[in-house]
Image (cartoon, rainbow, N blue to C red):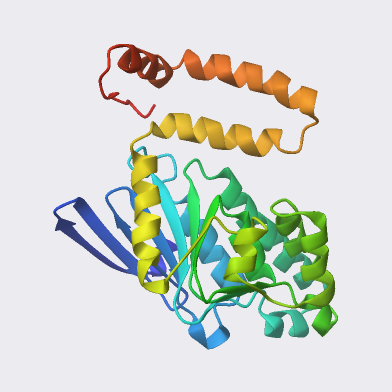
Amino acid sequence: MLASFKRKSTRSLFGLYRCVHNKHILIQENDGTREITLIHEKTKNSLSIDMMNYLIEAINENKDDVSLRAIILSAKGNVFSAGHNLKELSSAGIKQHEVIFRKATELMKSVIQSPVPIIAKVNGFAAAAGCQLVATCDMIVCSETSKFSTPGANFGIFCSTPGIAIARSIPKSQTTYMLYTGEPITAQKAYEIGLVTKVVPAEQLDIEVNEIIEKIKHKSRSVIALGKEFFYKQIDLDLLEAYKLGEKIMVENINSGDGQEGIKSFAEKRKPSWSHK
């Protein structure tokens, strides 16, 4: 599907800079960071079937390439994403509805199963499935004017699937408030209840996200990938089962090439030389 994108690749001081885009998303990749920007402002960056397909492909493209270290999800305009495309939902039958929500689940799984951290960079309104996509990301950095909501009940469609991601990020009483009232919460409130990682002025968004990514890049890619996979596996296990799995993962980690390199570099008081494999 990426063959349908317009492409531009150039050499920069940091290596190969790549830019591809169509009317739905823009992909920019440089120095191990891939930024995927929703650019379909006409539909408030709604998660149409096409939009979701493009996002899934962009997230999964060359995901096992060790040069890829982090992915940013951002959006153009004052709405990060308004959620599902209501025109698609209103004009479709049950079979198509099943396709739409199955595709949304596939999109969320692609975020969770990506071996690299995915950071949502939000400067605007994230609503319904758009809020679900944001909450599914590993970290969320937003501007002070951003807002988050699950307003489905206002339109007769309860935000059931968005609630799955939100309930795994914030306490029940805050989740039910968002789901039952449909009222938006501010960036500061989202930070206070744990929905977002950091809140910064809009002009500092890029700086803050880049600083986080630089910290990630100093770690072993393979260790981060192993840790991310384990995190999402253990979070829904009971405590003792989580510890049982954790023991196995710790042994696997310590006996990996980069695990041994980390221990040796610490003992020898030097910077580690990661293989990322």
Q: Residue pushed farthest bottom?
A: 42
* Residue 177 as seen in the image, left or right of residue 136: right
The residue lying toward the viewer, choosing from 122 and 7, is 122
234 to 268, vertically: above or below = below
Q: How many marks?
A: 0
The residue lying toward the viewer, choosing from 174 and 65, is 174
User: Residue 142 at what x, y percent from top left?
Assistant: 50, 66
User: Residue 38 at what x, y percent from top left?
Assistant: 48, 72
Residue 170 showing in the rendered view: yes
Residue 27 showing in the rendered view: no
User: Residue 201 at what x, y percent from top left?
Assistant: 42, 71
Residue name at image x 44 percent, y 45 percent = 63
- To which quarter of the image does residue 83 belong? bottom right
Residue name at image x 39 percent, y 26 percent = 277
User: Residue 141 at what x, y percent from top left?
Assistant: 49, 60
The residue lying toward the viewer, choosing from 140 and 71, is 140
Residue name at image x 46 percent, y 81 percent = 77
Residue name at image x 75 percent, y 85 percent = 91
- To which quarter of the image does residue 239 belong? top right
* Residue 18 as seen in the image, left or right of residue 117: left
260 to 125, vertically: above or below = above
